């Protein structure tokens, strides 16, 4: 796979903003017969409008779509210098918009040990051993993606990691991002001993016989090790961003919504933007916690005002963590986990969460809340409901969001539509749950039991009850490819004992295009293929609308167009 070099467009061109809510195939203004810069012909054009309108071809001039229609209509705009993309009957859709991603972290992960999908301990150890041997000069050996399934009891130990990396500190992040697995040298570097107390909202897993740390650190306990790890330089972070951009473009992703860390990430994104290298539209979230103060939020607002509506680099949203994850029993549940008294603590009390959300809402910020357990989901919905009751409604509307929504109580399904709260979900999290299963059991279903497991990941029921969906990957937690999520969300029949969550493929595509555009207040300029909309387009190798993908690899990207320029083309030699 090769990224085209003819696609870097000027920042001046990127900075043009046009608010032009459009729906369905449209023609340019009468008399506008100037040649198009790019045309896509012979496609099955899925416009992603509400009516499901289909067309054959798309014409682009500059950074805008100027015509969506038949091959004949679009061919009339071809000139001697028009670039032609032949779709060969494949689906043509708006560029995919990943509604929840950790983009620079994903870029770093591309250069670390990849443990994704490995379900046997010997395979995990072999991957780490091979990486460590080929990176002998690296001080700390880092990796990510381990599942719970390979480890007895779902909890890895330092001895298992010492067996393959003993002389250097080694840190492996769990696929869910809420635990790390470290070796003895890393524990020593962090000064973690039997006497080290658990930090707030964190746990040092300990040997029940000796009290010594096992090497598994949950939630904020991971920060004890991260605090002594080498700090990436600005150049390191920029290289990670560049790697992430190329990775995104090859999967048809032209927009991302970065879930937190704008405090650190904004200068890196701005430098790439200024250099004309930010070939993915980016909506960055600031991070808030129960200790965030109003003066601290005020300090973000100059940047927000400067980038409130930039079409490439945008601010305006704040992320809050309400709880953790089910696998490690840190998600907050209404009823206890199976077989234990604990139900998982929230990261802040519901009262503090409501106060924080109400303050941010009053100041005009969009809010997204990580909430996985049913108690955290309910508390988040309650906070949004309270904010709407006491604060004046902003002119643009609210469009607050909850992220993940894995284990929802039945009574809360319809509240998303009633409150106008967006359900931001990641279909491939279901597949990761499958891979964590030691058939027929695994930490996710075993922790909740069959009744709660059966109603998990309820995107179809939320939509049916009037809620809006925005799909993403949570990369590097799950693979960045939107195509894998399209496969899962359109084919997943049901969880054991549950109601089918499979959705029509058209609805799933909208959840990766027009849905995320709405979720970032950008539905007037992207997320659909129509005249006047930004020219972000993906061309697929087959017609997935007529023949939905039957496997995780069934969605193949042939061409990615960002801002009117081709930024990725699949090599002909790799064509099926």
Image (spheres, rainbow, N blue to C red):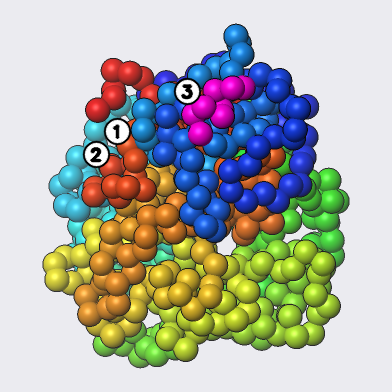
Q: Secondary structure at mark 3?
A: strand
**Left-right relation of 33 to 120:** right
Magenta segment's dominant SS is helix
Instruction: Please name the residue shown 25% across and 82% down the image.
Output: 450
Mark nearer the viewer, 3 or 2: 3
Cα separation, mark 3 vs mark 2, equals 40 Å
Q: Earlier in the sequence, mark 3 or mark 2?
A: 3
> Mark 2, residues whose alpha carbon is within 10 Å: few (<14), some, or many (≥20)?
some
> Residue 576: horizontal and vertical position, in percent?
24, 28
Q: Is residue 471 magenta?
A: no
Vertical relation: 545 (above or below) 337: above
Mark 3 Cα shell of 10 Å, populated few (<14), some (14-19), many (≥20):
some
Q: Which quarter of the picture shows residue 449?
A: bottom left
The label nearer to you, 1 versus 3, is 3
Task: Tell me the tag on residue 131.
Answer: 1
Q: Tell me residue 188's x, y (percent).
A: 41, 52
Residue drawn at (24%, 33%) of the image:
130
Q: Which residues are magenta?
A: 70-77
- Whether residues under marks 2 and 1 lie with C-beta atoms below 8 angstroms apart, the answer is yes
Provide the residue designation for mark 3: 85
Judging depth in this view, the residue of 552 and 72 nearest the camera is 72
- Can you give x and y, in whole percent of width and height, for residue 479 in the image? 38, 46
* Left or right: where 321 falls relative to 396: left
> 401 or 357: which is nearer to us?
401
Disc 2 and disc 1: Cα gap in Å?
Answer: 6 Å
Query: Which quadrant is the N terminus positioned in?
Result: top left
Q: Is residue 232 visible?
A: no
Reply above or below: 32 against 355. above
Q: Determine which of the numbered discs, if any, sits on residue 127 in the image.
A: 2
Asked whether residue 36 is in view, the answer is: yes
**Counting residues from the N terminus, which is met first, the one under dot 1 or under dot 3?**
3
């Amino acid at each position: 796979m090769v990224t085209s070099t003819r696609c870097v467009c000027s920042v001046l061109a990127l900075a043009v903003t046009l608010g032009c809510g459009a729906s369905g195939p449209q023609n340019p203004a009468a008399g506008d017969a100037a040649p198009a810069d790019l045309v896509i012909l012979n496609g099955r054009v899925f416009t992603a409008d509400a009516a499901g309108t289909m067309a054959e071809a798309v014409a682009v001039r500059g950074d805008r779509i100027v015509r969506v229609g038949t091959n004949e209509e679009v061919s009339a705009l071809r000139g001697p210098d028009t670039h032609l993309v032949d779709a060969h009957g494949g689906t043509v859709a708006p560029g995919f918009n990943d509604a929840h991603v950790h983009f620079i972290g994903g870029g770093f992960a591309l250069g670390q040990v990849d443990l994704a999908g490995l379900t046997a301990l010997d395979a995990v150890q072999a991957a780490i051993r091979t990486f460590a041997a080929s990176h002998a000069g690296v001080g700390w050996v880092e990796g990510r993606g381990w599942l719970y399934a390979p480890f007895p009891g779902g909890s890895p130990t330092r001895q298992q990691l010492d067996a393959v990396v003993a002389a250097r500190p080694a840190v492996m992040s769990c696929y869910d991002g809420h635990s790390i697995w470290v070796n003895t040298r890393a524990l020593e570097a962090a000064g973690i001993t039997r006497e080290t107390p658990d930090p707030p909202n964190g746990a040092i897993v300990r040997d029940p016989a000796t009290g010594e740390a096992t090497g598994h650190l949950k939630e904020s306990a991971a920060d004890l090790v991260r605090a002594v790890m080498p700090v990436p330089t600005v150049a390191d972070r920029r290289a990670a961003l560049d790697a992430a951009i190329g990775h995104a473009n090859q999967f048809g992703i032209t927009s991302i919504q970065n879930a937190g860390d704008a405090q650190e990430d904004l200068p890196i994104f701005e430098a790439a933007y200024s250099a004309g290298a930010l070939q993915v539209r980016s909506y960055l979230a600031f991070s808030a916690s129960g200790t965030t103060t109003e003066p601290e939020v005020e300090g973000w607002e100059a940047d927000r005002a400067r980038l409130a509506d930039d079409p490439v680099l945008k601010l305006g949203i704040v992320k809050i963590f309400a709880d953790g994850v089910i696998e490690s029993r840190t998600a907050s549940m209404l009823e206890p986990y199976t077989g234990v008294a604990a139900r998982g603590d929230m990261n802040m009390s519901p009262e503090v969460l409501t106060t924080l959300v109400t303050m941010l809402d009053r100041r005009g910020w969009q809010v997204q809340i990580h909430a996985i357990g049913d108690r955290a989901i309910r508390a988040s919905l309650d906070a949004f409901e309270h904010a709407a009751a006491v604060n004046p409604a902003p002119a643009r509307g609210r469009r607050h969001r909850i992220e993940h929504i894995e284990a929802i109580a039945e009574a809360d399904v319809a509240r998303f539509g009633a409150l106008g709260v967006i359900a931001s979900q990641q279909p491939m999290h279901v597949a990761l749950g499958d891979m964590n299963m030691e058939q027929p059991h695994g930490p996710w279903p075993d922790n909740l039991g069959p009744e709660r497991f059966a109603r998990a990941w309820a995107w179809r029921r939320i939509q049916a009850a009037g809620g809006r969906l925005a799909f993403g990957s949570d990369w590097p937690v799950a693979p960045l490819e939107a195509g894998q999520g399209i496969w899962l969300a359109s084919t997943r029949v049901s969880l054991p004992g549950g109601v089918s969550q499979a959705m029509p493929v058209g609805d799933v595509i909208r959840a990766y295009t027009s849905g995320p555009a709405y979720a970032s207040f950008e539905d007037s300029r992207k997320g659909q293929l129509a005249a006047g909309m930004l020219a972000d387009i993906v061309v697929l190798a087959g017609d997935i609308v007529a023949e939905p993908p039957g496997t995780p690899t069934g969605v193949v990207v042939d061409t990615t167009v960002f801002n009117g320029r081709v930024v990725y083309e699949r090599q002909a030699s790799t064509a099926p």
